[in-house]
Amino acid sequence: MYHCMQIDTLGVDGGGLSYNFYEQSCPQAEDIVRDAMRAVFMADPAAPPALLRLMFHDCQVQGCDASILVDEDANGVQITSEITAARNFGVRNRDSISYAKSLLESQCPGQVSCSDVIIMAARDAVAFLGGPLINVPLGRRDSSNIPSSAVADSSIPPPNIQVGDMLRLFAKKGMTTEESVAIIGAHTIGATHCVNLMNRLYRSDRPSTDGMNPAYELMLRSACPRFSLTPNISIVANDLTMVTFDNHYYRSLMAGQGALAIDTAMASDPRTAPFVARFASDQDQFFNAFSSAFVKLSYSNVLTGNQGVIRENCARM
């Protein structure tokens, strides 16, 4: 059951998207995806954050077009696909999108795009873990142009991104500073692989202004030892409520308990600190700003109308 509030986020130019896009062609589309995702989430507690991350990584490269779902051996031809990028390490649950898509194809053949399924699945992931139920417009189409792994690696932000770069990245997607701080709040669920923390924890020239709580740093070093043989496997929780979408993440940041450098930096940077404090004290404000940011991200370079295609199989061209 979804324990969340309904939020309509309007006022963004969706360029051909609409809130009732499938009303005639597949009126049960959202229910089919939601039921499919509920089954996935019940079977795998790690699936919700994985599907939210999948959306982020898809939309960051060349837009929300489901290009991240295409296999490197698509149609029997070996390609250097987006999913093989180093910064897509750990991206999972692509098969959950294919599962939902197969159910849609059985009811509404050729109507619902894989890119819309990604957005709906990410939205449902947030709601399933107690976050806001975000009303998202639909009507995206899938790309027939798959970017290389090099393009993906140059587009997806690195784990050591700085506040200024983060703000510029999301400003390009129409987000305000408040929305940019809110969208990073996706870190309130899930975990971070140790491999993404090693440079921050063990670099000799780490700035003294890093702001990490010393006790928290010791905990991270214990979980991610310097000469670990399994940094790609070992993980640390993003916050103490990693399976609940809430504002605990921001309270942790104010205590210097952010795993990634951007987490801690947001709490001290004068451009972002006021919003961190506001979200830490008011969960509804976080939910509203996150919902607005989520919708703006979901509009990123979408293909609509006669652009792109609707793939029958999300992993194939």
Image (spheres, rainbow, N blue to C red):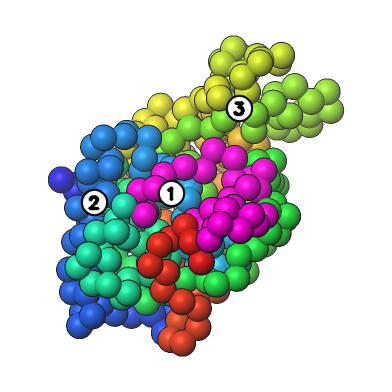
Q: Between marks 3 and 1, how big is the CA–CA gap? A: 19 Å
Give the residue number, with chain letter if any, for mark 1.
94
Please tell me how crowded label 3 is: few (under 14), some (14-19), or many (20+) other residues with Cα within 10 Å: some
Residue extending farthest bottom? 306
N-terminal of the pair, mark 1 or mark 2, is 2
Within the image, what quadrant is residue 220 found in?
Answer: top right
Give the residue number, with chain letter if any, for mark 2.
36
Give the residue number, with chain letter if any, for mark 3.
232
The kind of residue on which mark 3 rests is Asn
Within the image, what quadrant is residue 76 found in?
Answer: bottom right
The residue tagged with tag 3: helix, strand or loop? loop
Q: Give above or below for 151 relative to 144.
A: above
Please report the residue visible at 84 percent of the width from the left and 28 percent of the height from the top: 205
Q: Which residues are magenta?
A: 69-98
Magenta span contains residue 75: yes
Q: Nearer the viewer, residue 282 or 205?
A: 205
Q: Give above or below for 141 relative to 181.
A: below
Residue 227 placement (x, y as % from top left): 71, 14
Please report the residue visible at 55 percent of the width from the left and 67 percent of the height from the top: 63
The kind of residue on which mark 1 rests is Arg
Please report the residue visible at 37 percent of the width from the left and 31 percent of the height from the top: 241
Q: Between marks 1 and 2, how big is the CA–CA gap? A: 13 Å
Please report the residue visible at 43 percent of the width from the left and 35 percent of the height from the top: 190
The residue tagged with tag 1: helix, strand or loop? helix
Q: Nearer the viewer, residue 242 or 181?
A: 242
